Image (cartoon, grey):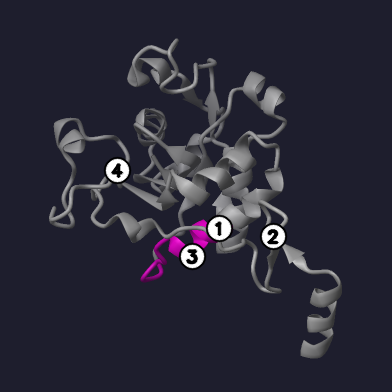
């Protein structure tokens, strides 16, 4: 069987998902596009996962979180938003390669904490995309990612949030402050409250930048009865 697989690979070599570079039979990315590890930056904020200065003790919140704590309790990320991770996400989100959701979910699955006991499984909730942006892009990247991760973890994925108004891209020149830009932009879908009541929710998105969008979504979920909200993103900017 190994000889057969080797022969197939020689005749039809596997290619990196981002380029035409040949990779091994069990590899998905070439050396140039190998997905980085999240802990390569060292110490992170215990709440928002922002990279902290060298020598900073572990387990503490950053100055921004101490000044104004976000509604979410923690952030789990697979990498930082630069280098290969940025290339993967740009190809996924803006390059129309929706199939990369499976690869990105694989990276998240390998880096997310595993439950230590028989605690109730988390509910995966994607950050919603406004319908007009959904039409323009052709797919909802956060929902694709959440669904792929849910399948790998054997967890429930539910679109319990909806975006009730379109917002400018966070950080764009025409946007107001990030907080003002997303304020009251999300609502709970009708009949969704009982699905999140008393549960731990993993809020899933592709990238976390300032955290304003995740914070607004988390507040909405907590007000609806979620016991705890943690953010799960591929990359932290």
Question: Left or right of 104: which side holds 230?
Answer: left
The image quadrant of residue 70 is top left
The residue at 18%/45% (across/down) is 61
* Residue 217 visible here: yes
Q: Mark 4 points at which residue?
A: 48
Can you identify the residue that label 3 sits on?
Answer: 110
Q: Tell me which numbered mark, 2 or 4, is placed earlier along the sequence.
A: 2
Q: Closer to us: mark 2 or mark 4? A: 2
Mark 2 in CB contact with mark 3 (< 8 angstroms): no
Return the disc, 2 or 3, that comes first in the chain's sequence: 2
- Crowding around mark 3 (Cα neighbors within 10 Å: few <14, some 14 to 19, many 20+) is few
Tell me which segment is drawn in magenta.
Answer: 105-118
**Residue at horizontal 38 percent and vertical 39 percent from the top:** 237
Residue at disc 3, secondary structure = helix
Sequence-earlier tag: 3 or 4? 4
**Measured Cα–Cα span from mark 1 to mark 4:** 29 Å
Q: Is residue 50 above or below residue 127?
A: below
| Of pointers 1 and 2, the one earlier in the residue sequence | 2
Mark 2 highlights which residue?
21
On the image, which quarter does residue 216 sit in? top left
Nearest to viewer (mark 1 / mark 4): 1
Image position, residue 10 (x, y; %): 81, 76
Q: Looking at the rendered structure, which numbered label has been put on residue 32?
A: 1
């Amino acid at each position: 069987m190994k000889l057969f697989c080797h022969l197939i690979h020689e005749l039809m070599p596997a290619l990196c998902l981002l380029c035409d570079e040949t990779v091994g039979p069990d590899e998905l990315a070439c050396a140039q596009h190998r997905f980085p590890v999240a802990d390569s930056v060292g110490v992170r904020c215990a709440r928002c996962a922002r990279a902290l200065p060298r020598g900073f003790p572990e387990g503490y919140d950053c100055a921004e979180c101490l000044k104004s704590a976000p509604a979410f309790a923690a952030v789990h990320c697979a990498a930082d938003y630069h280098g290969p991770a940025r290339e993967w996400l740009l190809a996924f989100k803006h390059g129309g390669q929706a199939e990369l959701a499976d690869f990105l979910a694989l990276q998240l699955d390998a880096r997310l904490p595993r439950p230590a006991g028989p605690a109730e499984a988390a509910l995966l909730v994607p950050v919603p995309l406004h319908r007009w942006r959904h039409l323009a892009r052709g797919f909802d990247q956060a929902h694709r990612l959440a669904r792929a991760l849910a399948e790998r973890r054997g967890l429930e994925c539910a679109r319990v949030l909806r975006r009730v108004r379109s917002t400018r891209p966070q950080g764009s020149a025409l946007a107001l402050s990030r907080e003002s830009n997303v304020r009251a932009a999300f609502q709970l879908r009708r009949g969704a409250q009982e699905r999140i009541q008393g549960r731990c929710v993993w809020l899933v998105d592709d990238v976390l930048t300032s955290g304003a969008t995740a914070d607004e979504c988390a507040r909405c979920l907590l007000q609806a009865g979620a016991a705890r909200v943690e953010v799960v993103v591929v990359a932290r900017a």
